[in-house]
Amino acid sequence: MALENQRYGRNKSTLVNKTFLESGEYRRKFDNATDNPFVNKTLYDCSKRALKHRSGTVFEDMYWINYNTGKILLSVEDSIEERAIVYTDKIKNIIKDNKNIITLHTHPSSMPPSCSDLNSCFNNEYKIGFVACHNGKIFGYTSNELINEKLYSMYIESFIKDGYEELEAQLNTLIKLSQSYDIKIWEVEYYG
């Protein structure tokens, strides 16, 4: 029954504001996401498609995009793992055979990139990763170093214990980790 409710978008906490997705404000967020306008257009199109598709669910969609051309190399739009994308052999082979990949995936909980996202970016040598959140925020990230998952969890627990909400705890953890690890995380915004 829970899976059936997910299919029909009945999870109110993960509903997407589809009017905002169609707005110029949302589109302009992608204008300077990268220095390649073809990639920026693809990121915008994929973000809109994925968020509309996954509105009201806890499932994610993901796209692998060629940084040079803006062409979609691969997509996963049928994941049934909650809040995760499972890397199949097909995905691994395409990643292995292509360099200069940019990824975009959704986060139903509207959280910034996770430790797993950063480590996947590093392990697969992605140029940049993007997270399209159900609340309309977009985060970009790069990782040139493997993050210790236990340390990541310890920082989050410490911030929550200090009274921070989960979003603030994750953002503070990412800021703290970026001081000692070669990672970058930023919110993608339009600056007129």
Image (spheres, rainbow, N blue to C red):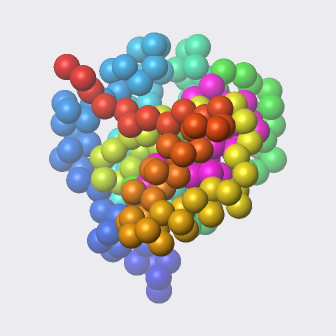
- Is 37 on the left-hand or right-hand side of 95? left
Specify start and end residues of the magenta stretch as a single range.
111-129
- Residue extending furthest toward the bottom: 1
- Is 156 on the left-hand or right-hand side of 88? left
- At x 57% / y 38%, what residue is drawn? 178
- Location of residue 27 in the rendering, given as x and y in whole percent from the top left corner: 27, 30
> Which image quarter: residue 54?
bottom left
- Location of residue 162 in the rendering, given as x and y in whole percent from the top left corner: 43, 68
For this rendering, which residue is in front, 15 or 146? 146
Q: Is residue 125 magenta?
A: yes
- At x 35% / y 27%, what residue is drawn? 30
- Is 7 on the left-hand or right-hand side of 174? left
- Location of residue 190 in the rendering, given as x and y in whole percent from the top left corner: 27, 27
Q: In the rendered image, is residue 18 in sight?
A: yes
- At x 39% / y 65%, what residue is drawn? 164
Tag count? 0
For this rendering, which residue is in front, 137 or 104? 137
In the rendered image, which quarter contains the C terminus? top left
- At x 81% / y 37%, what residue is drawn? 93
As displayed, is residue 41 above or below residue 95? above
For this rendering, which residue is in front, 126 or 9? 126
Q: In the rendered image, is residue 46 in sight?
A: no
- Residue extending furthest toward the front: 162
Q: Is residue 34 magenta?
A: no
